[in-house]
Amino acid sequence: MRTHGWGGDVPIDDDEAIARILAATRACIDRKGTSTSLADVARELQVTRPTVYRYFKGTEELLQATAMNAVGDLLTRVSVKLAGITQPDVAVVHGLLVVFEELTTESYVGLVLNVDHLNMSRLGELTSEVAYGFARSVVTQMDVDWDARGFDERDVDDVIEILLRTLQSLIVDRARERPEDELRRFLDRWVGASIRAIGN
């Protein structure tokens, strides 16, 4: 680790350096939004760009790390908004709406899904193991008794994949944004019907 810069307060180890870089990235996003760059973060920390490059390969990797760092808070907010919904189809449709809204408005996680940053590689990440883990957390934190509703482990895996692929579609096709009640009606016919069929 470099022993100068950092505004005269050098991190004690790499873990602290990474934590401070991520905090500085959040501060930059709060001010600059989608135009945040690695150079902005270096200035925020009063270090050179190579110092930040030591930990992150570039702006994209830095933004992704910042997003992953914020996932826990997002999951907590989603869980609160889904509390008390026990019907599988209703919970999944409402969950999709809540997650989509959170990703659209969440400064850190939502930034990496902004249309200005999307590419085929990023879209593929929406069905990656990390994304699957996020979706599994959403589904397992729902107040749905999946076993009692007739869903075995494979069925729940299908629910998770349906949620992820639907979310991927919603993010890609923002040009067809609809009022929430219309989107809810459509998702119930598309996703809700699939969930009801699995539970039968």
Image (cartoon, rainbow, N blue to C red):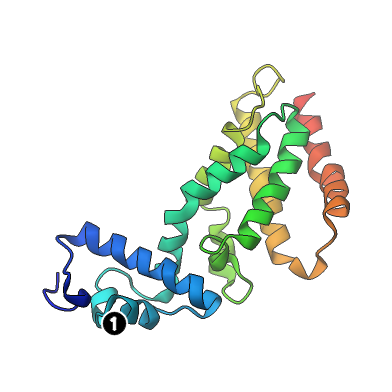
> Relative to 175, is 12 on the left or the right?
left
Query: Where is residue 8 drawn, in percent x and y?
Result: 16, 75
In the rendered image, the quadrant that contains the C terminus is top right
In the rendered image, the quadrant that contains the N terminus is bottom left
> Relative to 85, is 189 on the left or the right?
right
Res. 45 in view: yes
Query: Where is residue 142 drawn, in percent x and y?
Result: 63, 32
Could you say whether the residue bearing mark 1 is in a helix, strand or loop? helix
Query: Residue drawn at (56%, 74%), measured in percent from left and top?
Result: 117
The one of 198 and 56 positioned closer to us in this rendering: 56
Q: How many labels does the image show?
A: 1
Q: Mark 1 points at which residue?
A: 49
Q: Give the answer, above or below, for where 87 lies relative to 25.
A: above
Query: Residue drawn at (52%, 80%), measured in percent from left and top?
Result: 35
Q: Give the answer, above or below, for where 115 lies relative to 143.
A: below
Query: Where is residue 44 drawn, in percent x and y?
Result: 34, 77
Instruction: Decide: few, some or many residues near mark 1? Use Cα within 10 Å; few <14, some 14-19, many ≥20.
Output: some
Indicate the quadrant where residue 59 lies.
bottom left
Query: Where is residue 136 drawn, in percent x and y?
Result: 56, 39
Indicate the quadrant where residue 146 lies.
top right
> Relative to 163, is 15 on the left or the right?
left
Q: Tell which residue pokes out farthest to the left in this image.
A: 3
Query: Residue drawn at (49%, 48%), measured in percent from left and top?
Result: 73
Query: Residue drawn at (61%, 36%), measured in percent from left and top?
Result: 139
Q: Tell which residue pokes out farthest to the top in this image.
A: 148
Indicate the quadrant where residue 189 lies.
top right
Q: Say what amino acid the circle numbered 1 marks.
A: Arg
Res. 132 in view: no
